[in-house]
Image (spheres, coloured by chain):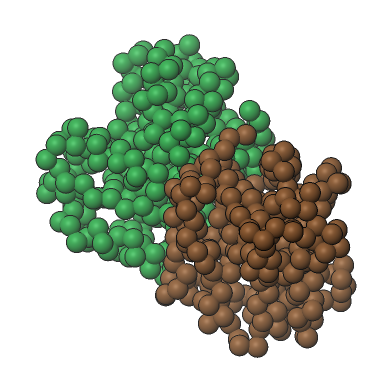
Chain colours: A brown, B green
């Protein structure tokens, strides 16, 4: 059991920022990454649909053999995690939202946190609830930044266009005395440099990918599930467009994915 | 039969620009519009997936009762139309691509046409083939403008951001002596003003929605399928997110959709 891979899923390529953080934190572990390219984006879909897709993917990965599941998508973490955990109680399942919320609470000094995410995540108010469950007195402001996803996938992460879009989305949030900004969508870390350049240097960014990798590490210890393997592997499964997946992955991963490691699957 | 509605489908809201043109051209006809919101966008999906989705929608609308089908999505027209027409030979099926190509050929004087579209449409080279089938000597240049879809759905159709993105995408095409620019994605007509403001006034835009409405009108005559009804109706079916559909539709339609006219369906 403990030598099985960890399952990681996202609607597409965004979760690769989480995979990269996991691989850095846990270099001996093996991973199966599933990108649901056929049905992306999740960020504009209804809660019921996101829950249905997530459970279907969870069961598919369980059949393939995994020891733990990481929901590497903020939208699915916000809308499907409680249901996944309730319906598959024997599998440890970790989302990116709670670790991000905890990291944000540990970071803020002023008690004012901003969260940027997809429309579905913002509408769910999941970050606000998760943060205020830890520290009820914290003030949370949020904004959906739909164009950031398209920018990241187009590879336009620098330059005047990404700067102008960043200002348009973030300026209203900066009216609040925030000192912490949560990147509440796995696509957004690739825009970190542009975001930093367009906000006050006193505001700290919280990348939930890194916070999640730390939580996964602790959970493996807790469940005594650390691998005993010396060689790690990574396998990629996509529900559509393997070529587009490989092409776009270069903006999200520090290495190039080999054609042979990507398999097209169908539910 | 002739009093049945015309079926119109798209992956989401973009096809509403085609519906609007159809309603203007054919004020007595009734329509059923299906927006496949659960599975949008089609523009980044593989040809096989787009073909499968399109056939499924076609059969669903046939069961509901339609006299004609309009594929109001350039990607589905490019990749699924021949297969739809071959597999459902008794239903007149019209896409937006051939009318757009014909209108472009009728417009150009220099013989240099540019096409802007989604990644899937551009990769399929369908516009180039359709144009050169009519006039082989025409030179066609094209560019995929993925961010235009996100811009249109965010309602950011004017201002410095849409201008900067337009210049980034179109400037390389303007090196060619083009005099005709085809809006090869149903989302793009809402950006017409910004596009016009950022290209030479000698370049004419081709909106395939209008060309398609003219072709549908001729086809109804040809098949003797014009309605005898005096009152027209329109019904909207969506596979997900009716609220988002209604909210975003305001950027694409000259009227507001009533809640009661939108039904959530599941395949």
Q: Position of residue B123 (x, y in %)?
A: 34, 45
Left or right position of A76 against A259 = right
Q: Position of residue B103 (x, y in %)?
A: 24, 38
Q: Is residue A22 visible?
A: no
Left or right position of A88 against A173 = right
Q: Position of residue A63 (x, y in %)?
A: 72, 38
Residue nearer the viewer, B25 or A249: A249
Q: Is residue B188 visible?
A: yes
Q: From the viewer's perspective, is residue B133 above or below residue B242?
A: above
At horizontal 60% and vertical 64% (from top left) the residue drawn is: A20
At horizontal 74% and vertical 58% (from top left) the residue drawn is: A227
At horizontal 77% and vertical 57% (from top left) the residue drawn is: A94
Quadrant for residue A265, please give it.
top right
Location of the C terminus of chain A by quadrant is: top right
Left or right position of A226 against B28 = right
At horizontal 85% and vertical 58% (from top left) the residue drawn is: A223
Q: Position of residue B249 (x, y in %)?
A: 54, 46
Residue nearer the viewer, B22 or A144: A144
**Given the current orientation, which residue lies at the most extreme bottom position?**
A202
Residue nearer the viewer, B74 or B186: B74
Q: From the viewer's perspective, is residue A20 above or below residue A192?
A: above
């Amino acid at each position: 059991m403990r030598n099985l891979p960890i399952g990681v899923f996202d609607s597409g390529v965004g979760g690769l920022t989480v995979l990269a953080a996991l691989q850095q934190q846990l270099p001996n572990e093996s991973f199966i990454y599933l990108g649901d390219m056929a049905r992306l984006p999740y960020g504009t879909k209804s809660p019921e649909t996101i829950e249905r897709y997530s459970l279907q993917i969870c069961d598919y990965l369980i059949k393939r053999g995994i020891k733990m599941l990481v929901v590497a998508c903020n939208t699915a973490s916000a809308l499907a995690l409680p249901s996944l955990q309730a319906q598959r109680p024997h599998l440890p399942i970790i989302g990116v939202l709670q670790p991000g919320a905890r990291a944000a609470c540990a970071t803020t000094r002023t008690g004012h946190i901003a969260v940027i995410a997809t429309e579905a995540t913002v509408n769910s108010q999941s970050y606000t609830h998760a943060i205020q469950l830890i520290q009820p007195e914290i003030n949370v402001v949020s904004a959906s930044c739909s164009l950031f996803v398209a920018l990241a996938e187009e590879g336009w992460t620098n330059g005047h266009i990404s700067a102008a879009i960043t200002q348009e989305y973030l300026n209203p949030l900066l009216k609040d005395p925030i000192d912490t900004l949560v990147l509440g969508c796995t696509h957004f870390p690739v825009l970190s440099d542009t975001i930093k350049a367009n906000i006050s240097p006193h505001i700290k960014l919280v990348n939930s990918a890194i916070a999640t990798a730390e939580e996964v590490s602790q959970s493996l210890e807790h469940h005594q599930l650390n691998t005993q393997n010396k060689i790690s592997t990574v396998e990629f499964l996509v529900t559509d467009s393997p070529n587009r997946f490989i092409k776009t992955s270069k903006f999200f991963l520090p290495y190039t994915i080999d054609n042979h490691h990507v398999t097209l699957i169908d539910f």
